Image: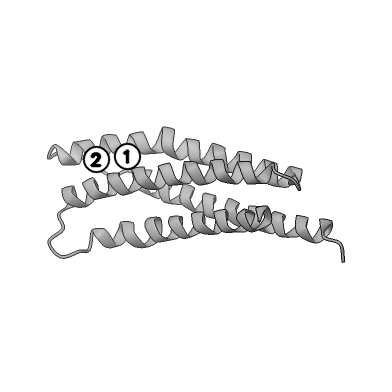
């Protein structure tokens, strides 16, 4: 059961990231009749929900990773990297994006910024780390599984 959760949780998290970051987010701006302020308001709600879900999934992944059989150092390092990356996204990049959104919602123009690309890059890093977790988990199974 634990080994299945060690695959299902990262798989679910990866699906969440791909669906929201790379499909829903760009498409909502293309919907007929959707204004930029409306799309930004929806985006804030969706990103907040996604970040909460990501934090819960990270916590669940940490818990199942430390249940026997325990994972190796590589997996622990990957979990730490996932945590740091998520904190950077939520605590540093997201507030700056919210400040820009506030300007737009107030009718202003915040100018150009690379913050959206930084946010997407962080999502790509999260995806890559989840793949690393899965690969290390698979390799760990092969080493500890009797033949």
The reply to whether residue 132 is in sight is no
* Residue found 12% across the figure and 61% down from its top: 33
Nearest the camera: 45 or 59? 59
Q: Is 80 rendered above or below residue 3?
A: above
The image quarter containing residue 19 is bottom left
Percent position of residue 110, x then y: 23, 39
Residue found at the very far right of the displayed protein:
147
Report the side of 91 relative to 128 (left or right). Answer: left
Q: Which residue is mark 2?
A: 101
Please say if the residues under marks 2 and 1 sit with CB atoms less than 8 Å apart. yes
Q: Which residue is mark 1?
A: 97
Q: In the rendered view of the protein, which quadrant contains the C terminus?
A: bottom right
Residue found at the very far front of the displayed protein:
1
The image quarter containing residue 67 is top right
Circle 2 Cα neighbour tier, 10 Å, few/some/many (<14 / 14–19 / ≥20)? many
The reply to whether residue 77 is in sight is yes
Percent position of residue 31, x then y: 20, 64
Percent position of residue 94, x then y: 37, 38
Disc 1 secondary structure class: helix
Disc 2 secondary structure class: helix
Nearest the camera: 108 or 81? 81
Total marks shown come to: 2
């Amino acid at each position: 059961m634990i080994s299945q959760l060690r695959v299902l949780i990262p798989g679910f998290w990866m699906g969440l990231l791909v669906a929201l970051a790379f499909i829903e987010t760009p498409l909502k701006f293309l919907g007929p009749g959707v204004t930029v302020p409306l799309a930004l308001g929806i985006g804030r709600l969706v990103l907040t929900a996604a970040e909460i879900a990501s934090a819960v999934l990270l916590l669940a992944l940490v818990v199942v990773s430390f249940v026997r059989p325990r994972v190796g150092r590589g997996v622990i390092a990957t979990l730490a990297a996932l945590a740091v990356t998520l904190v950077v996204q939520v605590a540093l990049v997201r507030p700056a994006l919210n400040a820009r959104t506030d300007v737009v919602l107030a009718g202003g123009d915040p100018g150009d910024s690379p913050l959206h690309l930084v946010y997407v890059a962080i999502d790509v890093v999260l995806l890559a780390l989840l793949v690393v977790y899965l690969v290390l988990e698979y390799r760990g199974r092969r080493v500890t599984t009797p033949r």
